[in-house]
Amino acid sequence: MDQEKQRQITIYFIEEAKEHLDTIERGLLNLNSLLTDPESVNEVFRAAHSIKGGAAMLGYTSIQSLAHNFEDNFKIFREHQDLQVDQQLQTYFLEGFDKLKDLISQLESPEGLSWDMADRIVRESAPIFEQIKRYLNALAGIKTETVPTPKPPVVVPPPQTTPVASVAKPPVVTPSVPVSDRSLVAAFQVEVPAKLRDMLQCFKQPDSPKNRDSLQALCDQLKAIGDRFGLPQWADLLQAMRAVLGRPDLQFRLLAPLAIREIKQAQELVLAGRANAIQISPQIREVMPAGFLVGEELRLQQWQTFLAQVGWLQSETVRYDLNAPDAHLPAPIWFEPWQDNDLANMRSLYETFLQKLGDCEIG
């Protein structure tokens, strides 16, 4: 095949591959719902198969190899549609997807896909796909023999062609989104709305202790989604909402719009990258059970309780013996000398205590 024809076919392959990549990425970002739809599973399988076949025809063995890995894994999805996937598996898949996408992007770049670049990406991807294989097999209950980790496939130098981007349209540069951020977006675009729909269905049912328990369980599940990404403000809101939903004197018709609105607004803040701006609104605070504390208020009370329990809080003042013996930290003068085997733990408590002392407003 002459170079001009090779170049034209490569341009066509890249455009098709990018469409197939979009299909695969959509499937991976909605992995849980993907498995409930056999046609969607077939769609991502066909997308990986098409990339593999086109790459094989043009001699891009690196792209062929990674697409083949996806094809094999999607085949397990077709055979085990009751598979219970989790966040870890999605993360592995997205990491592998980034490698396949890197190969296509490099092929489209002005420099083209060099042998060294292709080899490096394939070698970096090998442990990722090995993790996917082991994890997926474990979830599917497929027994695998213990064998040495296979070496990355040998990458055949790609065909020598004029770089595609030098004659085709310049590629649109899309910022690379970290896998962790993409996982967060997937969770808050797919999992959170699903929980909100379940919550709305509960509100449509008669008010009963069982339905209130279900609503509180949904709050726990929504909180757990945020916990995966370390979102304390989201967690505080869901804990407050859980407490409010536990009040039998508040009617569903009043609680439903409040709960759905507040959680939906918090979801939008998370997706906008402003999770720290989530607050418990005055409307929620007004109906929170008497004495219920959450967030910084709860943490402050816990520290004040700690001070009282260890005897560091007397008449709202704390006194220290700054002339403590060697190998002892300055401690309240009524506190017995610390034992050597407790020193490390007490040192840690003491340092943390000093950091929090100002928050306790006890002088």
Image: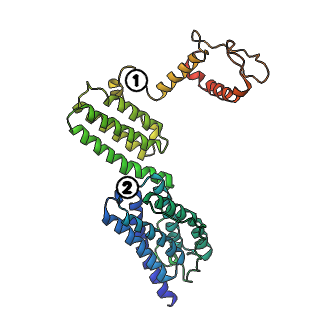
Assign the C terminus to one quadrant of the image: top right
Residue at disc 1, secondary structure: loop
Residue 183 location (% of width, % of height):
45, 52
Q: Callout 2: 10 Å neighbours few (<14), some, many (20+)?
A: some
Mark drawn on residue 292: 1
Give the residue type at disc 1: Phe
Residue 226 location (% of width, % of height):
44, 42
**Mark 2 or mark 1, which has the lower sequence index?**
2
CA separation in Å, label 2 and label 1: 35 Å
**The furthest residue to the right:** 326
Q: In front: 341, or 151?
A: 341
**The furthest residue to the top:** 315
Q: Callout 1: 10 Å neighbours few (<14), some, many (20+)?
A: few
Give the residue type at disc 2: Asn
Circle 2 or circle 1, nearest the eye: 2
Q: In front: 15, or 166?
A: 15
Q: Quadrant of residue 18?
A: bottom left
Q: Is residue 75 above or below residue 36?
A: below
Q: Quadrant of residue 33?
A: bottom left
Residue 200 can be seen, yes or no:
yes
- What residue sits right under mark 2 in the picture? 32
Residue 184 placement, left or right of 317: left
Residue 53 placement, left or right of 207: right
Say which residue appears at 34% left-offset and 40% top-offset: 218
Residue 185 location (% of width, % of height):
42, 51
* Total tally of numbered discs in the picture: 2
Say which residue appears at 41% left-offset and 42% top-offset: 269
Residue 175 can be seen, yes or no:
no
Say which residue appears at 56% left-offset and 75% top-offset: 113
